[in-house]
Amino acid sequence: MSDGLPGTVTAKALLGTLGLPAGPVRPPLRPADRLTTDGLRAAYDGLTTA
């Protein structure tokens, strides 16, 4: 969320990379781009391996 994206967008993007059902965000929100999604996953992986 530090990139200015709403929590819904970031949560759904991360859940999607984990293979969990989150569904798409509803308009007017737009899904996170690939760079943001990859960054979220990297941060998550860093927390889970620490």
Image (spheres, grey):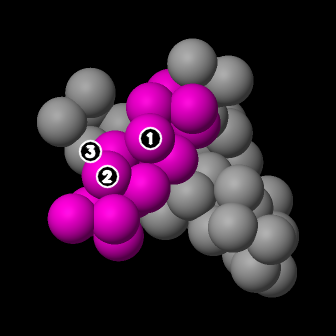
Q: CA distance from mark 2 to mark 3?
A: 17 Å
**Residue 19: image location, x then y, percent:** 80, 71
Q: Position of residue 34 (x, y in %)?
A: 67, 24
Residue segment shown in magenta: 36-50
Query: What residue sits right under mark 1 in the picture?
Result: 42
Q: Which residue is mark 2?
A: 46
User: Residue 44: which quarter of the image?
Assistant: bottom left
Residue type, label 3: Met
| Mark 1 to mark 3 CA distance (whole Å) | 15 Å
Establish if 12 lies above or below 31.
Answer: below
Question: Which residue, as the protein is rendered here, is positioned at the far top?
Answer: 35
Answer yes or no: do the residues labelled 1 and 3 have beta carbons within 8 Å?
A: no
Q: Earlier in the sequence, mark 2 or mark 3?
A: 3
Label 1: how many Cα within 10 Å (few below 14, some 14–19, many 20+)? few
Q: Quadrant of the C terminus?
A: bottom left
Q: Which residue is mark 3?
A: 1
How far, Cα to Cα, is label 1 from label 2?
A: 6 Å
Q: Is residue 21 visible?
A: yes
Which residue type carries mark 2? Gly
